[in-house]
Amino acid sequence: MSKTISVKSLNPAPGYLLVEPAKQEKKTDSGIYLPDSHEEKPQYGTVLAVGESIISESGVKIKAPAQKTNTVVYKKWGGNEFQVGDIEYQFLKFEDILAVVK
């Protein structure tokens, strides 16, 4: 029996956030359609779930830099991709978050 994983059932480990990356633009502002091979993925997305705080090596408690539903900007090479259906989600460390969009 195979069981499928739903995004709602994912709970990030302490120190991680689950982010749904923004949709990749298929058309430029000037109206030019881009091929699927251009592969420049967005570096921002919506936080779906937040792991618990972590304790640093020096004993300081580090809270998540964002909350559920926040839009965040993250490092280009940060995180680990996890695919559910047609969408590649990102598990990002707290330190991979560069900014929270207000």
Image (cartoon, rainbow, N blue to C red):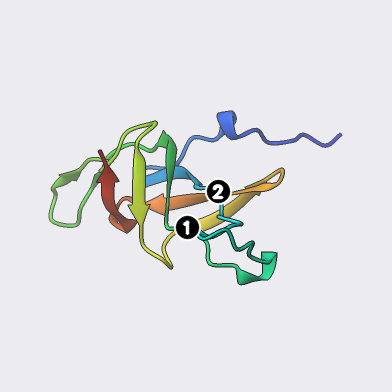
The circle on residue 12 is none
- Secondary element at tag 2: loop
The circle on residue 42 is 1
Residue 85 vertical position relative to residue 29 in the rendered view, above or below:
above
Residue 97, horizontal then vertical, whole percent: 31, 53
1 and 2 marks in contact (CB < 8 Å)? yes
User: Of 36 and 97, which appears nearest the observer?
Assistant: 36
Task: Kindly identify the residue that appears in the image at 41 percent across and 66 percent down.
Answer: 76
Q: Is residue 76 left or right of residue 24?
A: left
User: Of 35 and 96, which appears nearest the observer?
Assistant: 35
Tell which residue pokes out farthest to the front in this image. Answer: 30
Q: Is residue 15 visible?
A: no
Q: Is residue 97 visible?
A: yes
Q: Amino acid at mark 1?
A: Pro
Residue 84, horizontal then vertical, whole percent: 67, 43
Disc 1 crowd rating (10 Å Cα; few below 14, some 14-19, many 20+) is some
Residue 51, horizontal then vertical, whole percent: 38, 38
Q: Is residue 101 left or right of residue 93?
A: left
Identify the residue position indicated by label 2 in the image: 23
Q: CA distance from mark 1 to mark 2?
A: 7 Å
Q: Amino acid at mark 2?
A: Lys
Residue 33 vertical position relative to residue 97 in the rendered view, above or below:
below
